[in-house]
Amino acid sequence: MECNTVDVQHTASRDNTPNRRGFLALAAAAAAAGAAGALGGLPAFTASAAPLRPTASPMLSAADAAKNQLWWGAPGSAKSMIEQGLPVGNGRLGALASNDPAGELLMITDATLWTGGLNDKLQSDGQFPYGRDDFGSLTMLAELTVALPDHDLGNVNNYRRTLDLAQGLISTSYDISGVTYRRQIFASRPDDAIVLYFSQQGGGSYTGTVSLGGTHGESTTANSAGRYASFGASLANGLKYGAAVTAYSDTGRVRVDGTSIAFSGCKDLTVVVSGGTNYVPDAATKFRDPSLAPERLARTKVLNAAGHSVSTLLHTHVADFRAVFGQLDIDLGTSSAAQRELDTFERLRARHRDDIPDPELEAAYLQFGRYLMISGSRGSLPMGLQGPWLDGNDPDWMADYHTDVNLQMNYWMADRAGLSDCFDAFADYCLVQLPDWTEVTQRLFNDSANRYRNSSGKISGWTVAISTNPYGGGGWWWHPAGNAWICQSLFEHYEYTQDRAYLKKIYPLLKGAVQFWEARLITTTVTDASGTEREVLIADSDWSPEQGPLDAKGITYAQELVWNLFGNYRTATEALARDAAYRKTIDGLRARLYLPVVSPKTGWLEEWMSPDNLGETTHRHLSPLIGLFPGDRIRPDGSTPKDILDGATALLTARGMNSFGWANAWRSLCWARLKNAEKAYQLVVNNLKPSVNGSNGSAMNLFDIYEVETGRGIFQIEANFGTPAAMVEMLVYSRPGHVELLPALPAAWAASGSVSGVGVRGGFVADLSWKNGKVTRATLKSVGGRETTVVAGGASRKVSLKPGESVTLRGLG
């Protein structure tokens, strides 16, 4: 029905609302980032122009900052940093901080410090090698320790550490003998360094040592004249790396002592550490810059930063960080005073124990996911299974880029949650890898060892393995449909931004994937319910991730992804006015694609072209439901045949409500698409339960823990992004030409709330507020979109805007 009570107000682009693709034009960001802050950031650990400095303090007031703060009443244990250390990052460097009064420990990772290489040989079983030496692994860069022997935890009172999500800042405070000691830690993107600042109030001072060590047997050297320590080395694959640290104080004494930096009698102390590798995103140079000397560059960066006061460094960092974080704000309701009194991990425990909603904690969990993305995905490689946060050199699955859901899930949140520019790391990675992906595909995919080779003997385009690394290499099995899923994520980013320059950039990826599937599809005959036979196109032999028969044809996973790929390719060719003749060819193939049916035995949407369930009923992957999410072919709006919708719902129900964190997040997104608010919400709550002895759930520091086996859990980051994506999807659903407000609002958030900065497919950004489950006000801003229909509470309104304009809708009910 048409809504007759909508108040429409158009506002030109001078309304001071930033364009999503241009948020770095904000004055604060421009001041902070300077020449290094261009879209996409620096591609590697390289020299850069000095950042411009903000002329006024960008710091939030204590009251404003409190909304987005997490806090704990105890430090992290050095023996459990992945679960207790607090994360900081500047998009390339990441670190876990212990915040121990007697010894601050930072475990530092560079996103480009990877072992291995191209790994372009198949084993006799058709798999790529998958080890740390051949395929390779993300590995740690360094450990930094600031030892304070007089600050033993047993002498400490009033300990508290805080993670300020909005400002990218860790703060620690405690009292010893009437003196309050404070420290702050932040990872600055403009200065490309991690900064630690120690201060006090009450007449105290600091005495101790700063030690920097590698994690691969490197030798640290120190320079007394420059007052720094550093190391440099090369991995077995030839990748150079290095790190450096310096320290300075306005009081007391700071000097080099052996390979460490000693300090004594300092009322304040600033420590600056940086490092990196000579990795460059260029397949033509084998991903190396041989002229780059990482150790020397690291020394230059820390000494340049040390030429400024810590206040200047902090303000520069905060101006840069806030410009990104501030793109989205969310209020899911008010928590109780008793809940607010608890520290973050105690709130998790109470939420699980008492089963009482804690809307402020839930909103903070969403913002924690955004904090991690800003910290881990700007100007470098994308985030793999752990992002840039390791506590050792042997992460499970090498902390790689899994292409059968994990890499994609990491970026479902970006456009939805006001972080479109953080998606660039994913897109740039794919573009850089494309030459090697194409060459390896055309040389090896049809190798006789590959069980998934094309039975036609034809080969074209590119695809990937289940695991990929930053050297163009693959690991484990070939993953034929992985190219289509990667392209779906890449194309969806265009749907949010309507950026044709970006679409032109990714077009070779889209076309190469289409060409691969044109060569791969095979013809078979199916019989429909009426007994009519028809010829259809299906995918050649494949594995429905990661279960069931290894060699099944026409798996639902591949059929849905290829159907989406061909449709997205059509849109891209029309938008770019190119390849019209080839588009018609692909349109013809798409019209002949087999699409899944409902099993008469199970009542579920079939995962294989079989009425039988050939896998685990409660399997973690939702591969056959990819047409529900992240695809959009199956939806509860009358456009999907009822039997297909019912079959998808039945299959989702059978998969269950308790799984690994990332699997719960995917389930939540699917239930949100089906508008089942309470099930979608319950899965969010399931991911918030505290992890105990490695069980599935959230660790003390909110990292998602994946239970590998009884008593052993590991950190996998995608649930920290997939769960916030589900929360946003519960509040706003969109596809090009259509946006629905509060499609799956749970009772826990219904009383009142608001969200601003939500991405809308079709090129818009939505702000909305609600009360008693009904929208009270909504604003839609164009960032490239022109027309869409807004739906809320059964009412709808067609909206036409020019880029930069906005419209405010009231009385939607």
Image: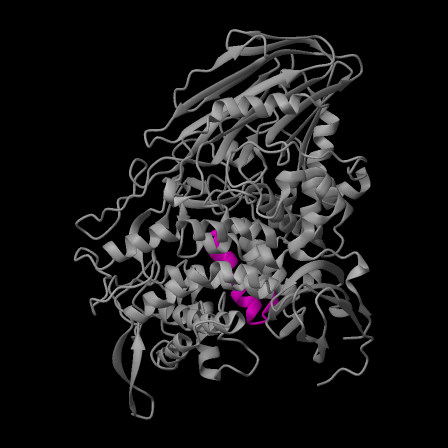
Q: Which quarter of the rendered picture does the N terminus lie within?
A: bottom right
Reply above or below: 795 against 442: below
**Coordinates of residue 107 in the picture (x, y in percent):** 51, 28
The image quarter containing residue 49 is top right
Asked if residue 158 can be seen in this view, the reply is: no
**Coordinates of residue 129 in the picture (x, y in percent):** 26, 44
**Coordinates of residue 329 in the picture (x, y in percent):** 72, 53
Which of the two residues, 31 or 334, is positioned nearer the viewer here? 31
Asked if residue 719 can be seen in this view, the reply is: yes
In the rendered structure, the answer to whether residue 575 lies left or right of residue 1 reads left
Q: Is residue 396 magenta?
A: no
Q: Which quarter of the rendered picture does the C terminus lie within?
A: bottom right
The image quarter containing residue 130 is top left
Report the magenta stretch's main SS: helix
Reply above or below: 8 against 55: below
Residue at 48% x, 27% y is 294
Residue at 67% x, 39% y is 33
User: How is this picture coloured?
Assistant: one colour
Reply above or below: 653 against 546: below
Which of the two residues, 697 or 634, is positioned nearer the viewer here? 634
In the rendered structure, the answer to whether residue 128 lies left or right of residue 617 reads left
Reply above or below: 426 against 185: below
**Coordinates of residue 346 in the picture (x, y in percent):** 64, 40
Range of the magenta residues?
Answer: 658-677
Residue at 52% x, 57% y is 665
Q: Is residue 670 magenta?
A: yes
